Amino acid sequence: MTLTTWDIRPETIGINDWAPEIDSLLEDPDDNRVVFNVDEADTRPYDAIFLGGGAAGRFGSAYMRAMGGRQLIIEAWPFLGGSCPHNACVPHHLFSEVAAELMLARTFSGRFWFPDMDGRITSIKEIVDLFRAGRIAPHAIMNFQSKEQLDLEYVLNARGTIIDANTVEVAGRRFTANNLILGLGARSRPLDCPGADIHGVYTYETLVEDLDYEPGDTVVVIGGSKTAVEYGCFFQATGRRTIMVVRSELLPILPDAETRDYTITMMKEQGMEIWEHSVATHLEGDHNGKVKAITVKTPDGVRRIETDFVFHGLGEIPNSEMAVEKLGVKVGDEGQIIVNPQMQTSVPNVYAIGDLIGRPMEMFKARKSGMYASRHIMGEDVHYAFDEFPDFLHTHYEVSWFGMGEEEAREVYGDVTIIKMPPETEDGWEVALPATDRMMLYAFADPRKSGFQKLIIASASRKVVGAHHVGAGARDAFQYLFQMYKRGLTIDDLAVMDELFLNPTHFIQLSRLRAGAKNLQDL
Ligand code: KPC
């Protein structure tokens, strides 16, 4: 393959101009241009080379540049921003929005203005194609913003090779820097099962690249945590029988048992079939080499499901091999590069950031780890621990949480006060959560489905120690509430806040109903 150089440094490339160029670099096998945006006139040494231009490398670079440092990103894809706009967060959110919309349409099928959805299967491929066509826009924004607005230097569309702790080679050129910051990301853990490679078996990465047919009426999803659940709910919402094959239990990530119970109950009520303690043992292909069936060992015996579409979400493996081989950096059990709170690896002047350093493989950690590596290199005394954070996932709903579940809080604090909605009734969740945006129709017409939320307070200190929400629209509140919780948020602090009524988390109003008491009571 002959690589050619496309020196973009002297040009201004607008977002609309970037889009067809990125499309060509991605799709045209004969377009092997390497994009060079390198300031050859700047004689300063680079403070850092970022190997990988995903969220971690891009935000680390932007921060370093803002602090007056000099950086260079080397990225194998022809765009910056990494997996988020290409195959991860952005499509996850599109698909989850489709799941929520279809749940609404199916719940109210034939009522009000909703069309009759009875027996209707909607297209998966149409939505995947919609994403594939649309993702060029965020790609173009990233390249434009990084060059024209953030003044970053970068080389795109060529894989960088580590030469030593200060040197990276890309497209036949060697670049040196005072520090190397590795942001090489992670890849899907493969399915360890005979037949796993046949056509029709997808991960979140391959689905958006390779789906070339409309899946039939039965889908099998392997895995029990965020990605598997998010995609599974999307597939199910399109009207297909969807079976989740889970090695242990579904959604162990949810720390509060009652919230988890509501979440899973609502998934089942939508029609999700959940086979826990079950393992896929082999996949069969048809005469065209396309999947036609999967066999699963379940606690009730071996079951064979005919399907032409299997998805697996089994977690991620950090791309640490080159760094281990070339630099000997220390890695943990899951292949994650071990870093200290300044993001330094075991090798002097080599840092690692983003998914490469392991869990949580979330955007906030990617961006912040890049930023903290840069701050340290630029001489700041910083410390970043990502052991506690607000979290969320999608089913057909949005589920948000931070802190402890009720069970752990009782163990740790003994006396805890629980404030939750809807109120406990003998019949479970037959009544509505006080209504809020995106839940109003459910609240009045199908109250069970209107959501669930819970605040956990350590009674003695009156501090919030956990918060949990299933519904819609609460995620923003959780990212700010978490900061307050870290500073010691109490029920009394909540009681004097100003609620924008009706709001998705009813924590302020509910706290105000109880905060007057010296001895707190549940609500
Ligand atoms: C919507 C959006 O921000 C998706 S792409 C993010 C990539 S990056 O800004 O580099 O974190």
Image (cartoon, rainbow, N blue to C red):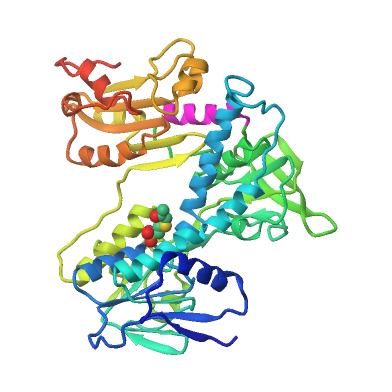
Residue at 30% across, 16% down: 523
**Looking at the picture, does residue 483 appear above or below residue 202?**
above
User: Which of the two residues, 407 or 129, is positioned nearer the viewer here?
Assistant: 129
Q: Position of residue 74 (x, y in %)?
A: 40, 76
Q: Is residue 269 magenta?
A: yes
User: Which of the two residues, 227 or 224, is positioned nearer the viewer here?
Assistant: 227
Among the 4 quarters of the image, the one containing residue 182? bottom left
**Looking at the picture, does residue 358 appear above or below residue 100?**
below
User: Which of the two residues, 336 or 234, is positioned nearer the viewer here?
Assistant: 234
Magenta residue span: 257-271
Q: Main secondary structure of the magenta part?
A: helix
Residue at 36% across, 34% down: 474
Q: Is residue 390 magenta?
A: no
Among the 4 quarters of the image, the one containing residue 404? top left
Q: Position of residue 87 (x, y in %)?
A: 52, 57
User: Which of the two residues, 298 or 438, is positioned nearer the viewer here?
Assistant: 438
In the orientation shown, which residue stands out farthest toward the right?
Answer: 287
